[in-house]
Amino acid sequence: QVRLVESGGGLVQPGSSLRLSCVASGIDVSAWIMNWYRQAPGKERELVAGFTDVGTINYQQSVWGRFTMSRDNNKDTVYLQMNNLTPEDTAIYFCNAVRSTLGNYWGQGTQVTVSS
């Protein structure tokens, strides 16, 4: 059974940092395409950052230079380091794991609120 569990969200002031974690069970994160998505109130879910099939990482333009995605294969965990947060980053952040015919899985999400 595949399970993705996010943590690390919270309420922070603009300019602050947070690090989100996604612990995976039932899969090897090094063999799956791991992504971070977010969904703001009233908006569609959007891709924030994700690994490609060759191991590079793509970022949404609005977070480029502020967010860093990483992966610890030994812990089956992916991270999203978020710096210089702005109110526009307020959203529920979701971890996603995709592998062609094997499945597409989502975590329950973690709330990030950036407000003064």
Image: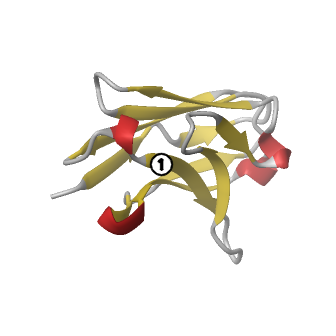
The amino acid sitting under disc 1 is Ile
- What residue is pinned by disc 1? 33
Q: Residue at x 67, y 74 (%)?
A: 44
Q: Position of residue 90 (x, y in %)?
A: 69, 53
Q: Mark 1: which secondary structure?
A: strand
**Residue extending farthest left:** 1
Answer left or right for 62 relative to 39: right
Q: Position of residue 6 (x, y in %)?
A: 39, 45
* Quadrant of the image occupied by residue 103: bottom left
Q: Quadrant of the C terminus?
A: top right
Q: Residue at x 73, y 49 (%)?
A: 89
Q: Is residue 104 above or below residue 95?
A: below
Q: Residue at x 29, y 22 (%)?
A: 74
Q: Quadrant of the N terminus?
A: bottom left
Q: How packed is label 1: few (under 14 Cα within 10 Å), some, or many (20 or more)? A: some
Q: Is residue 64 above or below residue 2?
A: above
Q: Residue at x 65, y 57 (%)?
A: 47
Nearest the eye: 79 or 12: 79
Q: How many marks?
A: 1
Q: Position of residue 54 (x, y in %)?
A: 57, 37
Q: What sort of colour scheme is used for the picture?
A: secondary structure
Q: Position of residue 62 (x, y in %)?
A: 84, 47
Nearest the eye: 71 or 42: 71
Answer left or right for 50 relative to 31: right
